[in-house]
Image (tube, rainbow, N blue to C red):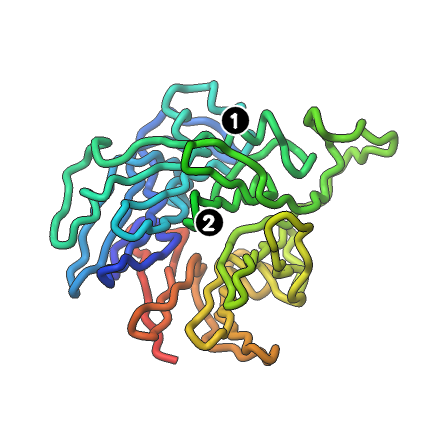
Amino acid sequence: MSGLNNPRGLAFGPDGALFVAEAGRGGSGPCWINAQQVCYGPTGAVGRLWQGKQDTVVSGLPSYANAAGRAEGPNAVGLLGMGGAYVTIGLETDPTIRTQAPELAGFARLVHVSPTALVPGQAHPPSNVTWEFVADLGTYEIDVNPDCGRIDSNPFAVLPAPGGVIVADAGGNALIRRDANGDLSTFAAFSSRYTTPQGPQCPAVPVDYPTTLPNETVPTSIAVGPDGAYYVGQLAGFPLVVGAARIYRVVPGTTPEVFLTGFTFVISLAFDSQGNLYVLQHQDGPGGAGTGSLIRVAPDGRRTTVIAGLTRPTSVAIGPDGAIYISHRGISVGIGEVLRIRP
């Protein structure tokens, strides 16, 4: 696939169609300062590749972008068989900012896409008829703050699960579950490097609270392993430290355990049918021009670099054909693409 706007998460449908979440390209405004000026526009979308034809099946989703074109918006798509799909809408900041303009209300949320939008061979005009907001992850972060860290929300990965769906909120440092009845709960929380407790269940602020906050490492990806456990990849914060990212193993009802260490800036995970774990690194080293790579971890723990030199990759998926699919140039407007790699 090519010509995409900030392509992010990938997922395959039951008919073999490939779907990609596009964070969009922002728009004419309103604009605000989020480290730098960013402007809103309903340009987020979900693209599809089916039988060699590329089209757009969902459009009009929230998006904001900076002058360079890096956008925040739809981050991931998860298919529910023939029952539609879920799409996460990111934010990447304190969700209380959403009160500044009505257009910001759609960020830090979960969207459900109607099954009719995903019918093979059909494309739909820009409209919100085929999708609706079904969960407010930003408000959940404000009210619950699962990691007892700073208030921040950036719903990223999404994974349909029995009786519901699980979202990796990178900003909130937690996995949030939405049950079939719409209730939200904390599926797993990860230790925050920030010592800024801001929730009713959090301890009092320590006396030695630092004035300069350390950088965060956050959960960005979630996949189900051959053993039925959930595996969560971690993206280490800036300044980037090579080898600082981990992969956790999560069993419902227990504390997340460190499964693998020594990775850098993990942004996506996928298992193949042989039990190999594919780890996508958004960057392998420091510097804004740093390239990423795909690493395969065999069941016996051996690590192999499958491909290096990737430009800001953002998602990996294993296709029904056994090939590896990667969202490439994932923070670019108009030049984003999906690569197919035959192992």
Counting the numbered discs, the total is 2
- What residue is rendered at 31% in x and 30% in y? 28
Q: Position of residue 198 (x, y in %)?
A: 69, 27
Residue 50 location, x and y as percent? 19, 60
The C terminus lies in which quarter of the figure? bottom left
Residue 86 in percent (x, y) is at 36, 43
Residue at the image position 41 percent from the left and 46 percent from the top: 75
Residue 333 in the image: above or below residue 100: below
Residue matched to label 1? 139
Dot 2 or dot 1, earlier in sequence: 1
Q: Which residue is mark 2?
A: 157
Q: Amino acid at mark 2?
A: Ala
Secondary structure category for the residue under label 2: strand
Which residue corresponds to the image point at 46% horizontal and 30% vertical from the top-left?
A: 136
Helix, strand or loop at label 1? It is helix
Looking at the rendered image, the quarter that the N terminus falls into is bottom left
Q: Which mark is residue 129?
A: none
At 50% from the left and 74% from the top, the residue drawn is 276
User: Is 311 on the left or on the right of 281, as rendered?
Assistant: left
